[in-house]
Amino acid sequence: MKFLAYVRSLLMKFFHSSQLVQEMDEELRSHIEHRADDLVRSGLSRADAERRARIELGSREHYKEESVRILGGNWLVVMQQDVRIAWRMLRRSPGFTLVAIITLALAIGANAVVFSILNALVLRPVNVPDGARIYQIEQAQDHIPSQSYADYADLRDRNKSFDGLALHGIDKAGLDVNGTPVPAWIYEASSNYFDALSLQPFLGRFFHASDEHGPNSVPYLVLSYSYWQNHFHGDPEAVGRVVRVNNSTCTILGVAPKGFRGTEVFFSPDFWMPIVNTESAETLKGRGTRGFWIVGRLKTGVTPAQATDDLNGIAAQLTKMYPGDDDGLKFGLARPGLLGNMLGGPVHAFVMGLMLLAALILLAACANLGSLFSARAADRWREVSLRLALGSSRGRILRQLLTEALMVSLGGAAAGAAGSILLLRELGVWQPIPDIPINVPLAADGSTYTMALLLALFSGLLFGLIPVRQVMKANPYQGIKSAVGVTAGMRRFTLRDLLLAVQIALCAVLVTSSLVAVRGMVRSLRSSFGFDPHNTLQADTDLGMSGYKGDQVPVMQRKLLDALRNIPGVTAAGFANRIPLNIGWSESDVYRDSTTDYRASNKATEAVEYAVSPGYFEAAATTVLAGRSFTWADTKKVPFVAVVNAEFARRVFGTAQTPLGRWFKMWGGKRVQVVGIVEDGKYKTLSEDPQPAIFLSIQQSPSDDTWFLVRGEHGTQQLAQNLQRTLNGLNTGLPFVISTWDRELGTALFAARAASLALGVLGSLGAMLAVTGIFGLGAYTVSKRMRELGIRVALGAQKKQVLRAALGRVIRLLAIGSAAGLALGLAATRLLSYIVYQATPRDPLVLVGVVLAMALLGLVATWIPARRALMADPMILLRDD
């Protein structure tokens, strides 16, 4: 009860503060009147008596402040007064207020967005109960998470560190609900997947390990919540419905909980299916087939190091039992979400780098606003001096300035948070790679708002305290005599100068990095990939989706290819099981022909592997350097043949003699003869080093996955319509995804585009802040030296001399900061070459662009202070003594 009474009293004092102030005014007036009455009785006139009474009493404001301070709990009254006065002062300077709020909104909004990305990709555990104990198993040597199903089964049954291990993989399937199959992306999961993650369904039930009784024994699927909403309109009757997946009958068991997208944050599957129903028995038994990921929940009290030792003990046993398959097998643990450390390491480093840059931008914004507040304090010198002379304490003035700063920072935080919410909403649904459900679930949550509030308080205090020195050293008598402060100390190099130089250098770094990234992107689109994507369409399908199996697949593939070649305007057509620079790839160990022991340590190289049809190299515009390409005679009835790239020939056969006609072996001892050599290319990423590549005959290495490439004489718009019409005419139930090859390169260019976009946005923010920073220091310098400038004009100084005196320091800081930033930017952009193909800092256009950009920023930022300096009127400035 006492606490409630205390709160009530505080609220009453806060809401009735005006009454309290009025009562203090009446009390002070009463004192003055009583003293004046005494003086009148002593013989003074009423006017002289009142004037003398006010002088004897002193500053009424000082007594009011002391009275409020003494009254316990009335800090609320003080705060209300400060807020009201601060609001009035800010309204009197709308231009300054708007610039300050926009500056902080940009800086705090950028930090909120980057923090939300950091939280989604790095800090937040996978979205399952007790997600902090979920770990992914990866190969310790190269941090690749891919494992075989057979190894997973051994780890699941033998480990003592996990409450449950589950396996999953990503694949594409054809879902037939109404008689027409449509492409869908799925998680192939072990039957205990949901149990290992301790999940409960939103609707229906999950499949369990108890449902599994061998291959093809679990004909069930579980829909994702979003797919259920979008394709089944949230109908509860969807549970129990029988559908066809890849022409096999399945029953919808249930719907996954809302917000659960699997254990990879970047991928949003349409549904989950038991892996025993999606993969062949050979794939499940083969230990060399490593295309699945293993996740598990650590037991309570077990550390990651202990679990790693446990897993590697099992790996040592598997190495002894299966020396050809699991040679040198060794495991490690990583956080799930970004394929463990394979993508997690680079993504974490990049996002942390963005967070650092965003933090530096916030510090630069605070330095800017500190300069603007200092300039404003210099312009309000007489006001501050008068308040001090009238009895106001320096602490009260400082508190008032801090209140103004905090109001600006809270306004900037509100605007920045609102902008970040809109941006995060757009980023959360952005799908950067066509036809693949890859995106990051970004949304503003409580942590985002808390971050914005903390940044607002921190930044408000930081830049609000910068004018403290001016107020503490303010001389009220000097301020009353002159409208401007003294100019002493303006020649010294100050902390404000250092902050501005650092800020300009940061801006130059961001501008340099942005230009390097953009130039790299332009070069990458014009460089040689080992193929030419222009004027080429691709049609992606999986014949297994329509029930084609075994020998039916190559027959249908050739039938489709023949039809495509007969389309008017088609110059070349072919197909492959996958295409370069697309998501996913396959690599095979390669051995020299004399090798008999097929351990991984004995391999000659590891090569990217493709299975292609006759006509593929012509459709891809890949140059055949020597030998021949494939023909329809390269079937299983003849020895295996391959076309290799030049890098493969160098690594396996050397340069002593031609590799044509020579043999090599693949895993398991399969002998393959080289019949052709093609140019090197890019296969996995644009920034990769030269990679060896093998192209096998699709007839000797058949695959249901089919990527048709169709090259036309002219544009692709009319060709796409003819292609769609032709494919639908052959099989209306076969789902195809048709697009230009240029568009599909978005997969390979995603990292470069994301880096360029992020650096471009931060570069723009840095440029804006550099403008306000240079403007702030220029305005402050001009405000402090207006009397000196007036004297120079009165003595006959030319405009050039006035500008040099007013802005010389600012121009020097701009030149120093730009030079330092350019040097740092050229050094830092070397790291971009790992993300952006063809990115190089040694580009004359980049150097010229940075110099011109920084010069333009300096010109824009100093325009207003320069005009103010040139308008200095010595008659006005020298009128006051």
Image (cartoon, rainbow, N blue to C red):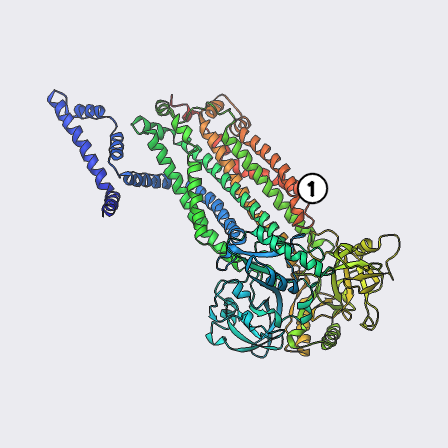
Please, is residue 764 above or below residue 179 in the view?
A: above
* Residue 502 falls left or right of residue 10: right
Q: Position of residue 460 (x, y in %)?
A: 42, 40
Q: Quadrant of the C terminus?
A: top left
Looking at this view, is 460 or 32 the one in front? 460
Q: Please give the name of the residue rendered at 35% of the width and 30% of the height, measured from the top-left corner.
A: 384
* Residue 200 falls left or right of residue 529: left
Residue furthest out toward the left: 41
Please, is residue 314 above or below residue 70 in the view?
A: below
Q: What amino acid is at disc 1?
A: Pro
Question: Does dot 1 land on a helix, a strand or a loop?
Answer: helix
Q: Position of residue 290 (x, y in %)?
A: 67, 62
Residue that numbered label 1 is attached to: 844
Is residue 861 at all visible to an observer of this figure?
yes
Q: Toward which corner of the image does residue 41 lie, by quadrant?
A: top left
Residue furthest out toward the right: 657
Please, is residue 453 above or below residue 865 in the view?
A: below
Q: Position of residue 311 (x, y in %)?
A: 62, 56
Is residue 539 at all visible to an observer of this figure?
no
Q: Position of residue 124 (x, y in %)?
A: 51, 53
Looking at this view, is 388 or 546 the one in front? 546
* Residue 669 falls left or right of residue 195: right
Looking at this view, is 869 or 451 the one in front? 451
Looking at this view, is 417 or 31 the one in front? 417
Q: Toward which corner of the image does residue 459 lie, by quadrant?
A: top left
